[in-house]
Amino acid sequence: MGGTKIFVLNKILVFKIGGSVLTDKKRSSLEVRVGVLRGIARNIKELIDEGYRFILVHGVGSIGHLLVAKYELHKGIKGKEKLIRLTETQNRVNEIIRSRVLRVLEENGIPAVLFLPSSTIYQENGRIKEFYYRPVQRFFDLGFVPIFSGDMVADTNNDLGLTICSGDQIAFELAKVFNAKTIIFGVDVNGIYDRDPVLPGARLIKRLSLRDAREILEKVGKGANIDVSGGMRGKLREALLHPSFFENGGEVWIFNALRENMLLKVIKGETEIFTRIAG
Ligand code: IPE
């Protein structure tokens, strides 16, 4: 393979497994792709054994997005009715997604420990204001792999009460706290395309500067219809909201986690089929 080899900038990786990888968000299927998840877990284990440290994040997939949209939880928690709906949403996401991810990680020998954003994050109008990270830091220092996911969290906004905190936003916050220089997003397409990848002639962008990211934002697909947290556009928006991450040498890599062993190939510089956003 030609071209320059790209290596990760330090051995701490924030890796988000997108909800579109865990479930088929386009078909609104609630089934978790356990086979794909197992493959990803094997790759993570291999990299841990080589000395990489992971902080994991995962999306809530079809079930989370469907329930949040159905009960309009993203429009605020008002009235008693909404309380039990939030409980129901939390419980279904715990059962269908979170516990599945945790079990597969455990089965592959990854010492993952779950942290809920609703227990560790306070927001202001949908943006993280406070992150109580000290317990997470301690677990990480001991060798555990902290794992987060998208969630509804407390918000200072009195009209809303709770707001969505996407896994994408959490990934940048975690990179800051843990001084990770590489944030990796595993999604269901090969990376960012110059237009919606379903359109004919769409080309994968392998290298994107933050400045180009602004331009490309409007051309990028908005993700599946059920998506209440922004899909690929949400990731670009997050990147643009964190210029200092890139100024300090940080990079965001976006690759297709539905393809076998892609995480390994991306980290080891064995493929160029992914998008790399760097300052
Ligand atoms: C969304 O989280 C959180 C809620 C809808 C409560 P994410 O944005 O991280 O989830 P995915 O990756 O799109 O499934």
Image (spheres, rainbow, N blue to C red):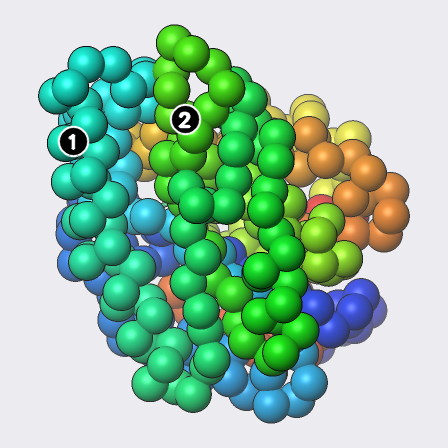
Q: Residue at x 85, y 52 (%)?
A: 249
**Relative image position of residue 192 (x, y in whole percent):** 57, 44
- In the image, is residue 198 above or below residue 101? above
| Image disc number at residue 163 | 2
Image vertical order of residue 73 relative to residue 38, above or below? above
Q: Horizontal placement of 206 versus 66: left or right? A: right
Q: Answer with the quarter of the image where residue 209 lies.
A: top right
Tell me the element at label 1. Answer: helix
> In the rendered image, which quarter is residue 33 located in?
bottom left
Please give the label number shown on residue 85: 1
Q: CA distance from mark 2 to mark 1?
A: 14 Å
Quadrant position of the N terminus in the picture: bottom right
Instruction: Tell me the kind of residue under disc 1.
Output: Arg
Badge 1 density bin: few <14, some 14–19, many ≥20, Cα 10 Å: some
Q: Is mark 1 within 8 Å of ligand 1?
A: no
Report if the CB atoms under discs 2 and 1 are less than 8 Å apart: no
Residue 156's x, y, as percent? Answer: 50, 19
